[in-house]
Amino acid sequence: MRTSIIIFASIIAFSSCKKDSKINDIVNPTASFTCKINGTQWTAITRVTRKENNKFIITGTGSLGSDVLNITTFGIEKKTYTLSPVDGKTEFSATFTNDTQTTDSLYQALYGTVAITALDTVNKKISGTFQFRTSKIINPLIIKEITNGSFNNLTYTE
């Protein structure tokens, strides 16, 4: 009898959920987010992309589950964004950590580029390329090169 009540309560609870769930808009099997980190291939297995306050924020988590790459463009146009302190350009920021469980594994982008090469505002999809050099926050002499980066067909939310 108790099992029947739990099943009945579950049916009622799930039937009251909204039918217009956005999950199909977020799950996008054609999307990809990849790069090489110091020459080693890295691929995001989960990707979250948001458009907010005149920025795109692209976050990917790798297969280890604790390795995260985050790119933020300071603009929402289809163009190349540059990070170059020498030239006074800060058009994007990026971070990488290979372990979110520790505070000493965070790398910050020093210079590089992020290009938004395709922007579909109707279907909310974004594609582009990136490359940049990072240094470890707690020891700036430790460098990671992020090369051959691309994000393709990422669905973004607003």
Image (cartoon, helix red, strand yellow):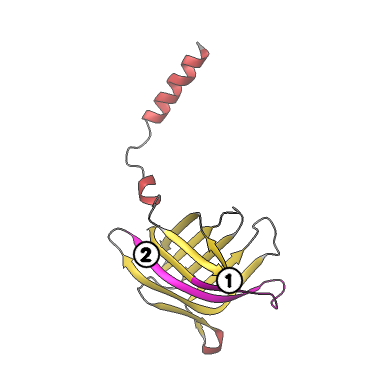
Q: Which residue is drawn at 48% across and 70% down?
A: 149
Let me know if residue 76 appears in the view.
yes
Count all numbered tags in the image, as a single digit: 2
Residue 128 vs residue 43, the one in the foreground: 43
Check disc 1 and give the amino acid type. Answer: Gly
Q: Position of residue 21 (x, y in %)?
A: 36, 42
Let me know if residue 158 appears in the view.
no
Q: Residue at x 62, y 63 (%)?
A: 97
**Magenta stretch: dominant SS?**
strand
Residue where numbered disc 2 is placed: 126
Q: Position of residue 133 (x, y in %)?
A: 58, 77
Residue 158 vs residue 119, the one in the foreground: 119
Q: Where is residue 121 in the image (x, y as percent from the top left)?
A: 30, 63
Marking on residue 88: none
Residue where numbered disc 1 is placed: 39
Q: What element carries label 2?
A: strand
Check disc 2 and give the amino acid type. Answer: Ile
Q: In this view, does 74 lie above or below 123?
A: below
Task: Write the start and end of the magenta stretch as one range.
Answer: 124-148
In the picture as drawn, the residue positioned furthest to the left comes out as: 122
User: Is 46 part of what is drawn in magenta?
Assistant: no
